[in-house]
């Protein structure tokens, strides 16, 4: 079965600082990878998905970006964080049919 | 694009009672409907799913029903236990990268 690793687990960053969240996947090859954000008390919002190395699709316009330098590595980045970027970020692996989620990163922007 | 609505946002039941969470979707082409359970501070875990060619699916105390005509699907939990307390999400998908989630239901099972 797949295992999704995310780090860090929690992060507190000042407004305007850069961001890099990493996700790696074990137990599968050539997975589709997803980044979701979950704001407090709200549902999951799809941010990015990737069907292969270097292939990124963005779902919503924002100051975040994603990259996939290796088959099982997915990175979420920002050059300058906003207060509204605070939330719980989840990486997922799988297909449109079935997705396995990582443990998440709780980001607080102050 | 697909739009998924989920009700209620919060649900409190006594241990042993049943809990029902309902979702509606907008895209008639959606063909896969998973349900996820998210415990505090953790990622969502898939608990049950249903495809558009099936009307009902059951797994022990959990069941999901799908009404394609009305475009709604529901999660039923019977004989609820305190460990069922969590946030539950429904989702619908029609194609790659297009899984849309409901806003979630916080279920509390009182002992």
Image: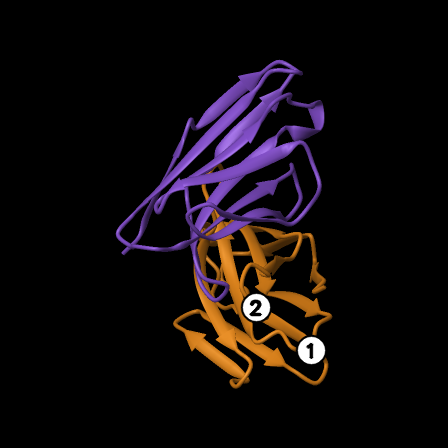
What residue appears at the point 42 percent right and 26 percent down from the top-left corner?
A8
Question: Percent position (x, y) of residue A103?
Answer: 42, 39
Instruction: Answer left or right for B101 relative to A66.
Output: right
What residue appears at the point 53 percent right and 73 percent down from the top-left corner?
B64
What residue appears at the point 50 percent right and 41 percent down from the top-left corner?
A90
Chain of the residue that carries numbered disc 2 in the rendered image: B
Disc 1: which residue: B28
Give the CA separation, mark 2 to mark 1: 12 Å
Q: Colour of chain A?
A: purple
What residue appears at the point 56 percent right and 81 percent down from the top-left corner?
B52
Judge whether residue A48 can be spotted in this image. yes
Considering only vertical position in the picture, is A67 above or below B83? above
Q: Secondary structure at mark 1?
A: loop
Question: Percent position (x, y) of residue B97?
Answer: 55, 59
In the picture, residue B3 is in which quadrant?
bottom right
Chain of the residue that carries numbered disc 1 in the rendered image: B
Disc ID at residue B73: none
């Amino acid at each position: 079965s797949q295992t999704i690793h995310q780090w860090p687990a929690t992060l507190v960053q000042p407004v305007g600082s850069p961001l890099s969240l990493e996700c790696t996947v074990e137990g599968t090859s050539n997975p589709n990878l997803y980044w979701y954000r979950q704001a407090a008390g709200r549902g999951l919002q799809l941010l990015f998905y990737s069907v292969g190395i270097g292939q990124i699709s963005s779902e919503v316009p924002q100051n975040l970006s994603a990259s996939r330098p290796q088959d099982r590595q997915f990175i979420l980045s920002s050059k300058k964080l906003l207060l509204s970027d605070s939330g719980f970020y989840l990486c997922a692996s799988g297909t449109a049919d079935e997705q396995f989620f990582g443990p998440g990163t709780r980001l607080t922007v102050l | 694009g697909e739009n998924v609505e989920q009700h209620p946002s919060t649900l409190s039941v006594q241990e042993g009672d049943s809990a029902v969470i309902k979702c509606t979707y907008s895209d008639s082409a959606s063909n896969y409907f998973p349900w996820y359970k998210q415990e505090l501070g953790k990622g969502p875990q898939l608990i049950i799913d249903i495809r558009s060619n099936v009307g009902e699916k059951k797994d022990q105390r959990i069941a999901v029903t799908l009404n394609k005509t009305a475009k709604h699907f529901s999660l039923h939990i019977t004989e609820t236990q305190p460990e069922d307390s969590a946030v539950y999400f429904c989702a619908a998908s029609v194609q790659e990268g297009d899984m849309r989630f409901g806003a979630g239901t916080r279920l509390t099972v009182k002992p």
